[in-house]
Image (cartoon, coloured by chain):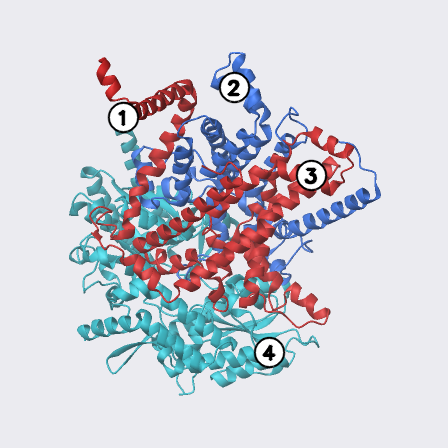
Chain colours: A cyan, B red, C blue
Amino acid sequence: MKRIKLSKRLAVVGTVTLSSMILAACGGNNEGNTEANANADASNNSEVSTEELDDEPVTIEMMANLHTPETPGDFLKDKLEEKYNVELDIQWVPDGNYEERLNTAFATDTLPMVVPMGFDMFNQFKDPIRADQFWEIEPYLEEFENLSKLNPEILDNTRVDGKLYSLYQGRPLSRQGVIYRKDWADNLGIEEPTTTEEFMEMARAFTEDDPNGSGSDDTIGLTDRSDLVYGAFKTMSSWFGTPNNWGVVDGEVKPEFMFDEYIETMDFVKEMHSNGYMNQDFPVTSKDDQQAMFKNGGAGIYVGSMGDVLSIHTDATELNPDAEYGVFNYVEGPDGEYNVWAIPGFGSVVLFPKSAYEDENELRKVLAFYDKLMTPEGANLLVWGEEGRHYEMEGEGVNWIEDNLNEVDNDIRPFLSLEIGEPATSGRYEMASTYDVKAEADKLTIENEEYLVHDPTITLDSESHITYGDRLDQMMNDATHQYMLGQIDLDEFNATVEEWKSEGGEAIMAEFTESYQAQQ
Amino acid sequence: MSGPNLNYNQNTEPVFLSKQEKRQVKKQEMIKSIKKNKLLYLMLVPGLIYFFIYKYIPMYGLIIAFKDYKPYLGILASDWVGLEHFIRLFQGTDFWIIFRNTLTLFGLQLVVFFPIPIILSLMLNEIRSNWYKRSVQTLIYIPHFMSWVVIVSISYVVLTLDGGIVNGLLEMMGFGPINFLMSSEWFHPMYIIQVIWREAGWGTIIFLAAISAVNIELYEAARMDGAGRLRQMWHITLPSIRSVIVVLLILKIGDVLELGFEHVYLLLNGSNREVGEIFDTYVYTAGLKQGQFSYATAVGFFKGIVGLILVMLANRLAKKFGEEGVY
Amino acid sequence: MLEDRSVSGRLFNVFNITLLGIIALLTILPFLHVVAASFTTSAELAARRFVLIPTVWSLDAYRYIFSTDTIMKAMGVSIFVTVAGTLWSMFMTTLMAYGLSRRDLLGRGKIQFLIIFTMLFNGGMIPTFLIVQQTGLMNSLAALIIPVSINAFNMIILRSFFQNVPTSLEESAKIDGCNDFGILFRIVLPISKPALATISLFYAVTYWNTYMHAILYISDSAKWPVQVLLRQIVVLASGLNYDGGEYTNIPPPEQTVKMATIVVATIPILIVYPFLQKYFAKGALLGSVKG
């Protein structure tokens, strides 16, 4: 045992030296960055030398959401363990069954020390959080230099009754925008739309004016999918000025579908659908089928995450080398303003169940590990792997090494679900753009931040929403689809809204309103 | 016993004795029978232990249907709420719609799907060429291994209005496009055709096994009597596998509310939910997805009771017709 | 069986053979699509949605899934669980089914009712998890087998088959001095091959498809069967996760990879049936079963 530990320690020292050598080797690239890294190294070095004398490696048991087909190899785990003097015991759980696994672990008192969960799960867990089942971490945060860099606004979005229990994994606030066939628009002499009317005109022209010059009627404008949120609908509803899920009128919290702007958006889609400017089966179309239509030249407009343009472009040019894409975000509604809905700024949070800890010192050690993952060096290792092996520098950003993509998939990608913070707070590299339209998409994502519409209920509580929310959402999603397909009229839609109210909606509105007013 | 008493008690005592005697005789017979069959009981022991440990001990979990279950409190410490969850279920505006939909899909399974594997296996049984028979058997058994996710997504590609093959063919033949995927009229046909497509071949296996146990001499005798193929099928094959059919039918009825959650869930959309929402899909959005285990368990409990009643009825009916039944 | 040479018999044959051929073809088309899709590129798949014969052939999907040994290891786990589980379950099920098949057994009705009851009611995921934990099976492959030792449905079916074994055979064996175990192993099992093959197949397929239990009971992903991998790929590639992949920066697997994984993970269990078919051959039995 002792010998193993000794060799491990030697390996730690060795790796630290080696990695600083590697970093020094690429110093010419970016002076400031290297210096920062060198500093981080120095402090790390001193930490290691003090820790290695008196500290056993701390074992961290964690659950992690598996977003890739396969669980990762040991490469990165070993690296992290050596570097940060920890033993990682990671239980990977396939994404599709994460909630069941988490609920079972919770109910059987077998939660590990670190438990990540998405936004919906987090809301369900507010009850046990209030029942003191998880560590409140705010008192400890200031002890950690890097963790205290986490964005306070986003942290606020994760508070429960004003207290902080979790670290968040950051996500850009809004990547929503439009991708379109630039070559088609050029053929027809259409400019990028800036209003909803021009957008409709583009969809019309792409449908009726033979944008691909084939001489036959084989194209449509918009391709959409069943998802009313991440598909086209919600983004378009922002253009019309609809609030993000919930809106506040005179201090009262109301659902988006009680706003006229929501109805206007539905009418807009209904017009596109009935005129054949979009796919007729969009309420049952999957993301894959939606994108296929865009890639194979059947449709010319895609509303959603602008970053998708990269993979779409790759496949589409294989089929048709002449396909050209463009992105834009700015579309004014009838009121002459551009708005875009925002997510709360995080993709998931990690919680620390008290039952898995002996004392707060253990919690400190776990937080210390996350603190290190928030250094540029730690975050780069976690997200990108090893330079020269998995990624290479390209300007300010990095790129995967094409020849080693299998290794990237196997060693590195799954670990993305362990990331804390975001590039802006951890200082890690971002992906370099080799495709200029993708670079434009990234730029517009940042530009979106000036036009954001936030969901006012992110930090509000409603017990009824947790109990009845999904069922009620489904009811309104169904009605929205049916209205846009012309299967029900406005009176029937409003009747569904009334039904929504009587089956729990009214209670949700009242609870959110009360919670809202208490916070003001 | 003394003489006079014997006479005096003649009227009552023999009756009393015979009752006791009956019991004793019964008891003795029981002991005798158990002793005689002790090896058979021994055979049951491993199975009984299994069912006790892994099926009956966890049954205490059913009580959360009557509690407000909070995972961090545990099953026992959570508060009792009595029938609250059942009341929520029964009073929901959709309860009768869901009940009707569930029974409709069940009816389709029973009336439309159930006979098909039987017919298919009778047809397969009539094929002389061994390799042809085996090839067909193997091919029709393959779809059982494809997940509903894949089947439903292939159905979309084939049936969509946006360039699907079927609507393309319909158009060529001069028919208008049919909105298969988003209509309440086409939901049931689509559901049952997909079930047939995936499960019919798989379903034949058990009947083919039963048919292979039929005595060949019976066919030869029938042929002597000049019976044709269809009559042989009707009078020999079918009666020979009747007991297997009945057992399967009863077990299927017990499955009344297990109609394939994943399949139905993937087929549902706003335009067909009215006819397609069943208990399993309802409880997923209304309970499980939100971690409401108590409510989900209550719905499962209700399904179990309906299933139990139907199985008991079906079993009694089967016994009336001289069949063995399932218990 | 003798040939039936009458006109109606021949017509029947032609009709029967043709119809079954058409049925087989219709059933297999979607699977052919899956196979074809696994041998092409994702671009081709986006262009022609329903592919039966690829115009562009590619082995990339297979190269990708075999670039690590994960799938082969997972297949190894699946094969082990399937073989061991089927043997174990057949042992347990046969004993119980035979015991219950004997009509003179007192209390069999009650026992069978209690077994049927478990098909309709179960305690749910959490109590079952706890019992698996308390019986010390966590994180071992036995957790995929022991808690599902006997499937009530299979057991009742097998019992019905055993009941069709003529009692005369059993009685004569008894006279020859066999005890109940002897009758089961020497008389009943040998003439019940089709039934045993059927139920074995049912078990094998169930074990092959195991996946939820693996996720719940086995935290060491090296012990996951291939269905976990398959399921994960299908779910990811179909974009079924609720946020459409919006919260992760990880690109979903290619459709072709999904198809290739389906093919690889399905073929081992597909080839089981043809091997079992000889047990279904007509007349393979002693010709003395009740009609």
Callout 3 and callout 4 share a chain: no
Q: Disc 1 on helix, strand or loop?
A: loop
Q: Nearer the viewer, mark 3 or mark 4?
A: 3
Q: Are marks 2 and 1 in contact (CB under 8 Å)?
A: no
Query: What's the amino acid at mark 1?
Result: Thr
In this figure, which residue is indicated by the disc labeled 4? Answer: A206
Q: Is residue C245 visible?
A: no
In this figure, which residue is indicated by the disc labeled 3? Answer: B125
In this figure, which residue is indicated by the disc labeled 2? Answer: C183
Query: What's the amino acid at mark 2?
Result: Ile
Q: Is residue A137 visible?
A: yes
What residue is rendered at 57% in x and 34% in y?
A: C198
Callout 1 and callout 4 share a chain: no
Q: Disc 2 on helix, strand or loop?
A: helix
Callout 2 and callout 1 share a chain: no
In this figure, which residue is indicated by the disc labeled 1? Answer: B12
Badge 3: chain ID: B
Q: CA distance from mark 1 to mark 3?
A: 66 Å
